[in-house]
Image: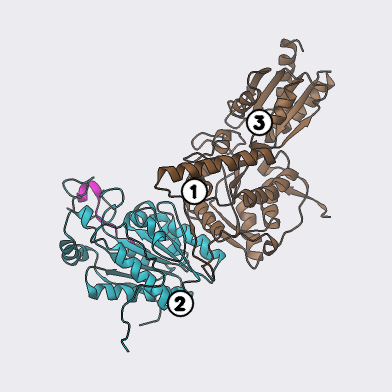
Amino acid sequence: MSEKVLMRGTHVVAEAAVRAGCRFYAGYPITPQNELPEYMSGAMARLEDGTFIQAESELAAINMVIGASIAGARAMTSSSSPGVSLKQEGMSFLAAQELPAVIVNIMRGSPGLGNIAPSQGDYFQATRGGGHGDYRNIVLAPASVQEMADLTRKAFDYADRYRVPVMILADGMMGQMMEPVILPESIDPRELPSKPWILNGAEGRPSRIIKSLFLDPSVEEAFNWKLVRKHQMIGREISDAETDLMDDAHLAVIAYGTAARIAKGAIKRVREAGLKVGLFRPVTLWPFPEKILQGLGESVENFLVFEMSTGQMLEDVKLSLAGSGEVHFYGRPGGPIPTPDELAKVISRLYHRQKL
Amino acid sequence: MAKQIFKWPKYLKQVVSHYCPGCGHGIIHRLVAEVIEELDIGEKTIGVPPAGCAVLAYNYLDVDMGEAAHGRATAVATGIKRVLPDRIVFAYQGDGDIAAIGTAETIHTANRGENITCIFVNNCVYGMTGGQMAPTTLVGQPSTTTPGGRDMNRDGGPLDLSEMAALTSGSVYIERTAVNSPKNVRRTKKAIIKAFKSQMASQGFSLVEILSPCPTNWKMSPVDSNKWIEEVAASIFPLRVIKDETGES
């Protein structure tokens, strides 16, 4: 059993990646995630089989990851919002070529250049695929430094299991804050299951092609439906959410990542005042845990979606509930971090207005 | 006993070509396949075809092939080679791919001295998309987006990507050849052998630029296309060894 250590979120993702057997990292500097590549540069240098490349661009970095994945390595890149936009071309290709990879987005205030404060404005981009075409990425949303470690391990496992890109969607707060963490045990990448599809030279076997060009529309259509079936399987197998204090709740606050941490503080405050409020926290943003939420919808009528954006996950909540219950929203886009007190007031006002 | 002096290369698939009559890709594919066979590296070679006419190179070359997005071939090749340093990795790219949308990837891959080989097929035009101006289109050369010919003041002049790559500290061997005559085809093959051997010796980045005819988009006969390479294109892109630090003659 590993002992508890105090570490920063970005460092934890990097260390957890190494422990998950990641041996290839390429990235380009952007705040607030620079500690991640910095950590990786040292960690990879200490490994006999590790590669760290500071790429000339985000585009180059994600394409290097594509190459490393083609060659069979567990590979990762990381960035923050504007840089993740640049990676979308490569993410579409990863999905189309059915290549595993892990992409970390430490979100910051946007759109455009925005700022370097924590934000959750990239939910749509992350959960809708982000690049061109009909595809989805698995999106995992950690809400603690411990979860940064645990979900990084899961990200690599899911990527390999389903041959898809997996995004870890956190923000500047999750990336920068320090908390005690128990790191997962190390995996030797040579002990991971072999990948029978990689390109490593056609020794003693027919040559292979990894591609995404299907000039015949009916072949492209068939491939798209194959992706849909894979997406449906992923939805059945890995949808995940945390529920907290929901047993007697009249109102469910729905939030992920940093916003969920703020929500927990707010709920603690209103609970002290006797308000029956609980939390629903999606851990997988895609697949969205709609079945778990629908289960809550049987006992709760009122939902408050809280995001550090103008309301993006809000749409998935409404789609999941499909008209059952009342969905309210509170959001702060662009980088300000709402306090638990601020949110507690919002919850309290709503609670009394709805006569709960 | 008759001695066999010509045969179908082992690593060239026996399929019908989709390339236009007079196109240079068929010759260059054959040369790459011959070199892979002669160097006996067919079971350890991984190719990265580009977006463009030659994206279908994987239909012809019988080695592992991993497709890249437009311009990103050298970045993908970098990732493959770093994970599998004892394999032979080459990118096969056209002029629009390598010298416009992929300029940054190409120059920085060269500058890092990645131990890979680029086969750069220069036909001075965007072929697959139907004949638009390429970074390598000559001044005065008509294209579908420069109907009156490329204008130096409006469009800039042809970009010499190979010279740029040669300026980087990580490039080892860069030569420009052509496939418009039997003599030049033989020279091209020698250059490809040298580039692959340099990679096998882990010397760094190698690139062979090959002036190649595109009769369809040049709107010329194949014979006139070969003449145009000799008389016009090669005057702007001279056939020569641009950089050679391999230590081999």
Give the quarter of the image for residue A272: top right
Q: Nearer the viewer, residue A40 or B219?
A: B219
Looking at the rendered structure, the secondary structure element under dot 3 is: loop
> What residue do we see at 83% from left, 18% from top?
A273
Does the stretch in magenta take in B118?
A: no
**Which of the labelled discs sits on residue A93, or is there none?**
1
Looking at the rendered structure, the secondary structure element under dot 1 is: helix
Query: On the image, numbered disc 2 is attached to which residue?
Result: B40
Instruction: Please say if A213 is above or below B192.
Output: above
| Amino acid at circle 1 | Phe
Query: On the image, numbered disc 3 is attached to which residue?
Result: A337
The chain displayed cyan equals: B
Q: Nearer the viewer, residue A221 or B43?
A: A221
Residue A136: in sight, yes or no?
no
| Amino acid at circle 2 | Asp
> What residue do we see at 62% from left, 48% from top?
A162
The chain displayed brown equals: A
Question: Residue A49: x, y in percent?
Answer: 63, 66
Q: Which residues are magenta?
A: B151-161
> What residue do we see at 70% from left, 26% from top?
A294
Question: Residue A186: x, y in percent?
Answer: 74, 58
> What residue do we see at 75% from left, 12% from top?
A352
Give the quarter of the image for residue A351: top right
